[in-house]
Image (cartoon, rainbow, N blue to C red):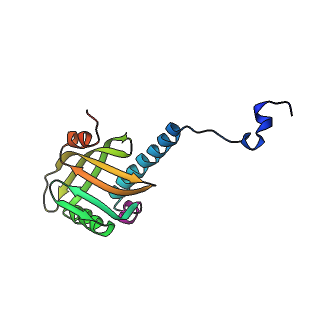
Amino acid sequence: MSGTWPERHPRLDSCEFWTARDTARELSQENVEIVRRIYESINAGDWDAAFRDVDEDAELETQLSGSFRGRSEIRRFYEDQAAAFAFLSVEPDEILDAGDQIVALLRVRGQPHGSTAEIKVRVGNLWTIRDGTVVSLRSFPKREEALEAAGLSE
């Protein structure tokens, strides 16, 4: 043994060392991708895929429609909302990492059944994801409120 560090610790030779910051960054990026996939699935009308990563006991809190608990109740709420429209699109302008939460700033466009009018709104959602599973979603009619709830500002 020559006394150099790798020779004295051969089991550590091939290990990659990750800092807590690197791990947190990777997890945050995974959470951003989960949220992005959910919106893509909603826009494709694939409700099974949209709710695949939502916890069975997840909570949805909306300022306009109240609160909902459980994957099936949340899914039913969103399906009912979408059913009122001949066309509906939910497009993220930005998806922001806010530590243990994800903020989505959205453009929602829709055309109600039986109408030629198109509704356009900008809203914000605040997601909490643990271990790759959505545990809560808070929906805000104003983007600034979502940013404020996450401790961010525009």
Magenta stretch? 46-53
Could you say which is closer to the camera, residue 39 or residue 35?
35
Magenta stretch contains residue 51:
yes
Q: Quadrant of residue 81?
A: bottom left
Lateral position of residue 117 relative to residue 12, left or right: left
Q: Where is residue 93 in the image (x, y as percent from the top left)?
A: 31, 41
Q: Which residue is drawn at 52% across and 42% down?
A: 23
Magenta stretch contains residue 123:
no
Q: Position of residue 89 (x, y in %)?
A: 27, 52
Could you say which is closer to the camera, residue 57 or residue 3?
3
Q: Which residue is drawn at 18% across and 43% down?
A: 142
Q: Quadrant of the N terminus?
A: top right
Name of the residue lying farthest toward the right: 1
Q: Position of residue 120 (x, y in %)?
A: 18, 47
Q: In which quarter of the image is residue 105?
A: top left
Q: Which residue is drawn at 42% across and 48% down?
A: 31
Could you say which is closer to the camera, residue 69 or residue 75?
69
Q: Quadrant of the C terminus?
A: top left
Q: Which residue is drawn at 31% across and 45% down?
A: 104
Q: Where is residue 4 in the image (x, y as percent from the top left)?
A: 79, 30
